[in-house]
Amino acid sequence: MMNFYMPAKVFAGEYAVRDHMKDALKGFRGPVLLVTGASSAKKSGALDDVLSALRDAGLESRIYDGIRENPLLTSCMEAGQLAHDAGCDLIIGIGGGSPMDAAKSIAIFAAYPGLSEADFYKKAWATPLPVIAVGTTSGTGSEVTAVSVVTDSTGRKHSINDPRLFPVASFGDPRYTMSMPLPVTLSTGADAIAHSMESFFSRKANEFSRAAAIRGIRLAYAPMKKAAAGEALTLADRSDLYEASILGGLAISVTGTAYPHNVGYFLTEHCNVPHGFACAVFLPSLMEHIRKEAPETADAFYSALDISEADMRALIVSTLPEEKLGLSEEDIENELPRWENNGTVKNTLGTVTQDYIRGLLKSV
Ligand code: NAP
Ligand code: FE
């Protein structure tokens, strides 16, 4: 069986916005809401390219630049109201996963202003506004997923996954990722690797997702090794990393993620660990877990990658910061029920028990 659905038009490569945004904007009358973080949309050059395409198309725009890392649901509500009041017919998210994911949730609130938090999560909405994603990091693959991860009013990260949230078109120009500082390159690259690896070790993996996952990790391996060694990345390296992130996104758009992602949310919420690091810290244990519980899958993975298990582990460890987090026993115990019936935990090959997760959290 090889089922998949990925309706976004994807333009990944140098000058993608300049060359193709015009087509994607056809049929919209504006105004358009541009959703960004604090400064990277400008710094990367992406915002200027998008503004120039909008000018050429004769479309007006408004900017909401209030999205921060791990975007808040309340910011999405606020921006959605703004888009609604301005009569916008399109949302363009420009940035890393945070603005791109936020754009998807904003598109819901723009179509249903005043929608409550509960109804948002219950999916008591029909058709969000269309979204275009313009990526400036090489990590989340949000360009090609139907997922929006936002932080709810209690401070928890939740991902909402629905085919209506696929962007209509996505753009990624590796030139935009040149301005990423090293820790952002490492964390987002680790996220891309995590997506591919978790997807491969998922119960839902199929021929398409496995092929995307393997190619994604193979493309990311050399530039991540360079970055971890502190070497500067060339545009060709950046391009490989960007494509790796898209391939990782395609892989999880079929399978979803495995437990490292969901357990990683907790590290972000409690200790402010950047998303990619928070997930990748659990990859070495995922590798051990799969070696023990599904050895044929482990063999198939490293042989398709043509990278040894030891080298893969060494790469991951070399990308991670060294600090110890020291979560309190109480925090861990309070949080454990969260993973009792969790989809990503059940999605992981083998058996992942509460005891196992307790051990993982104590070890970071
Ligand atoms: P991010 O949170 O979007 O951005 C991290 C930091 O990098 C921000 O300070 C941002 O600055 C900066 N930055 C972004 N692009 C830059 C550039 N080109 N040059 C310089 N700085 C740049 O990071 P992310 O890792 O891409 O996204 C993480 C979020 O995505 C998390 O909330 C995670 O849960 C979610 N996620 C979603 C999916 C999915 O399938 N949808 C998958 C995995 C993760 P600004 O604030 O100025 O923009
Ligand atoms: Fe991720």
Image: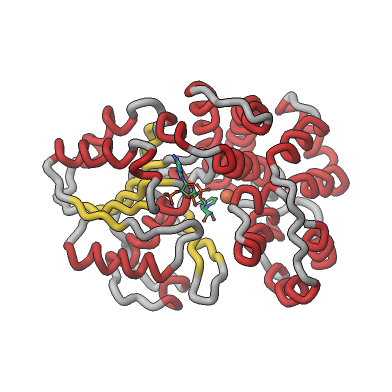
Q: 332 or 342: nearer the eye?
A: 332
Q: How is the image coloured?
A: secondary structure
34 left or right, relative to 175: left
Q: Say above or below: 23 vs 61.
A: above
Asked if one can make out residue 219 in the rendered structure from this viewpoint, the answer is yes
161 left or right, relative to 169: right
278 left or right, relative to 147: right
Q: 292 or 113: nearer the eye?
A: 113
Quadrant where the image shows the N terminus? top right
Q: Position of residue 258 (x, y in %)?
A: 67, 53
Q: Say above or below: 136 vs 82.
A: above
Residue shown at the point (81%, 46%) measured from the top left: 290
Q: 161 or 188: nearer the eye?
A: 188
Q: Position of residue 193 (x, y in %)?
A: 63, 39
Residue shown at the point (15%, 36%) measured from the top left: 56
Quadrant assignment, res 219? top right
Q: Say above or below: 332 vs 217.
A: below
Q: Residue furthest right?
A: 292
263 left or right, relative to 14: right
Quadrant assignment, res 136? top left
Quadrant where the image shows the C terminus? bottom right
Residue shown at the point (34%, 30%) measured from the top left: 16
Residue shown at the point (84%, 62%) measured from the top left: 359
Q: Residue furthest left?
A: 58
Asked if one can make out residue 2 in the rendered structure from this viewpoint, the answer is no
Q: Position of residue 229 (x, y in %)?
A: 68, 29
Tally of numbered discs: 0
Q: Position of residue 238 (x, y in %)?
A: 51, 28
